Image (cartoon, rainbow, N blue to C red):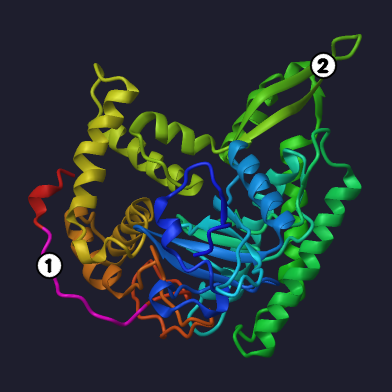
């Protein structure tokens, strides 16, 4: 390691000093490299092991590395889903004192995947649509805070499962700019057009390689982000007028926004001079309505759709077993102790890296419903759990750190799965030893 090395980081991990910064990134020894799938990037990006974590290292210029590091930290502070910036390393040089490129170091987002890794052999239209819808939500959230991305694409995004949908996380903020006064309509439309063109190109690239289903239309899918974005933007920021006798529509608008996963921090309400017409407009909208409620009640930090699904199960538990002398917090604690936590403890240790706990619980509920429909009876949770573990979960690949060849080009096996949780994207055929799950660990 060169003695002139400079490391800028909010929380420095001393293990950073042990990595071979004196070598060009493409010459790092294999023992330092983590074989994870990666997206397409204009810069050289490699994954490496650091302590108990995996980090992504991107070679770039001093200025760009420092700028992107600062931007990602700012976005984190604004609760925008993005990768965690770990450090900027400058003044690198090899053993001959030849200057090497500076690097940006980010922490690998566990249970996340680049879009190319979210399918096994071919990308189906419904999976592609879910990815684009997730990206539209992320773009709306960025535009609300005044962030112009400038390079919107599937490649610059990571995706995590979120109860049948996907949640999108910004990876590359290199071209981004934050405007304190907000974005103009022209800036938003520019970002939207960049997204449409990039997504169409990415899907056409997959199509040329025979990696999409025959019925997938790249143009239709890419146009979908425009429609999804505009619909959500209008709902979140558009004004609405109605008769003063229809004041119930104020609560209806708030409920619609909550159902979409957003909270209103301020609502502007105006009436005309005659008092017969009311005009409302959300002023500041914050995402994560269900996430925050679940976190407050249970301490579980999940995706928005996962939170919605877990809250639905909590509400069902409350309706079935709730006591009048218990408030909402007490019932949530009881549900956590008697339902959620016993399920998580019942997952065999060798399967805990397959999916996030909240996603496991969501898929378990899906599988239980599917079994009930097939057998025309109410399936106990313990019975559904055993079936889900042995028939579904064991055949998934680990998504905590999905392994792939060093080039980042991955070839995945054909999905092996049955039941309600059927996805085209990612199943492994590797078997694990069967471990019975005792029914006494579940109370409902």
Task: Give coordinates of residue 1: x percent, y percent.
Answer: 49, 65
Q: Which residues are magenta?
A: 428-437
**Of discs 1 and 2, which sits in the foreground?**
1
Q: What residue appears at the point 46 percent right and 82 percent down from the top-left corner?
A: 405
Task: Give coordinates of residue 200: x percent, y percent.
Answer: 75, 73
- For label 2, the crowd category at 10 Å Cα-Cα, with few meaning under 14, some 14 to 19 and many 20 or more, is few
Identify the disc placed on residue 103.
Answer: none
- Name the N-terminal-most of marks 1 and 2: 2
Residue 252 is drawn in which quadrant? top right
Location of mark 2 (residue): 270
**Relative to 390, residue 304 above or below:** above
Residue 430 magenta-highlighted: yes
Between 410 and 14, the one nearer to me in the picture: 14
Residue 309 magenta-highlighted: no
Location of mark 1 (residue): 435
Q: What residue appears at the point 24 percent right and 16 percent down from the top-left corner?
A: 325
Q: Is residue 79 left or right of residue 396?
A: right
Q: Is residue 299 left or right of residue 320?
A: right
Q: Is residue 115 left or right of residue 60?
A: left
């Amino acid at each position: 390691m060169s003695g002139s090395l400079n490391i800028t980081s909010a929380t420095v991990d001393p293990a950073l000093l042990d990595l071979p910064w004196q070598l060009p990134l493409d010459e790092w020894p294999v023992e330092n490299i983590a074989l994870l799938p990666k997206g397409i990037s204009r810069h050289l990006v490699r994954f490496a092991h650091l302590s108990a974590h995996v980090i992504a290292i991107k070679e770039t210029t001093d200025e760009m590395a420092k700028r992107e590091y600062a931007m990602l930290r700012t976005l984190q502070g604004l609760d925008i889903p993005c990768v965690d910036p770990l450090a900027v390393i400058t003044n690198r040089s090899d053993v001959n004192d030849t200057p090497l490129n500076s690097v940006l170091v980010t922490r690998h987002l566990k249970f996340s995947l680049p879009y190319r890794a979210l399918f096994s052999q071919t990308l189906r239209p419904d999976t592609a649509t879910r990815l684009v819808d997730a990206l539209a939500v992320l773009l709306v959230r960025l535009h609300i805070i005044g962030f112009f991305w400038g390079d919107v694409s599937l490649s610059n995004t990571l995706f995590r499962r979120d109860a049948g949908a996907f949640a999108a996380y910004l990876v590359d903020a290199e071209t981004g700019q934050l405007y304190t006064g907000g974005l103009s309509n022209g800036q938003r439309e520019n970002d939207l057009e960049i997204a449409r063109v990039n997504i169409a190109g990415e899907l056409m690239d997959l199509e040329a390689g025979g990696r999409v289903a025959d019925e997938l239309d790249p143009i239709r899918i890419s146009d979908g982000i425009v429609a999804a974005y505009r619909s959500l933007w209008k709902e979140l920021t558009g004004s609405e007028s109605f008769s003063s006798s229809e004041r119930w529509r104020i609560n209806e608008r708030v409920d619609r926004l909550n159902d979409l996963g957003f909270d209103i921090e301020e609502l502007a309400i105006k009436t005309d001079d005659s008092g017969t017409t009311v005009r409302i407009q959300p002023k500041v909208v914050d995402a994560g309505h269900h996430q925050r409620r679940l976190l407050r009640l249970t301490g579980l930090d999940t995706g928005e759709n996962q939170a919605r699904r877990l809250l639905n199960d909590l509400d069902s538990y409350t309706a079935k077993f709730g006591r009048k002398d218990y408030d909402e917090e007490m019932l949530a604690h009881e549900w956590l102790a008697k339902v959620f936590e016993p399920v998580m403890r019942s997952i065999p240790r060798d399967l805990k890296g397959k999916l996030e706990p909240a996603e496991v619980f969501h898929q378990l509920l899906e599988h239980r419903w599917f079994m009930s429909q097939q057998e025309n009876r109410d399936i106990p949770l313990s019975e559904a759990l055993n079936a889900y573990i042995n028939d579904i979960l064991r055949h998934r690949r680990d998504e905590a750190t999905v392994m792939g060849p060093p080039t980042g080009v991955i070839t995945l096996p054909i999905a092996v799965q049955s039941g309600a949780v059927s996805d085209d994207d990612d199943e492994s055929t590797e078997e694990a030893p069967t471990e019975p799950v005792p029914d006494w660990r579940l109370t409902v």
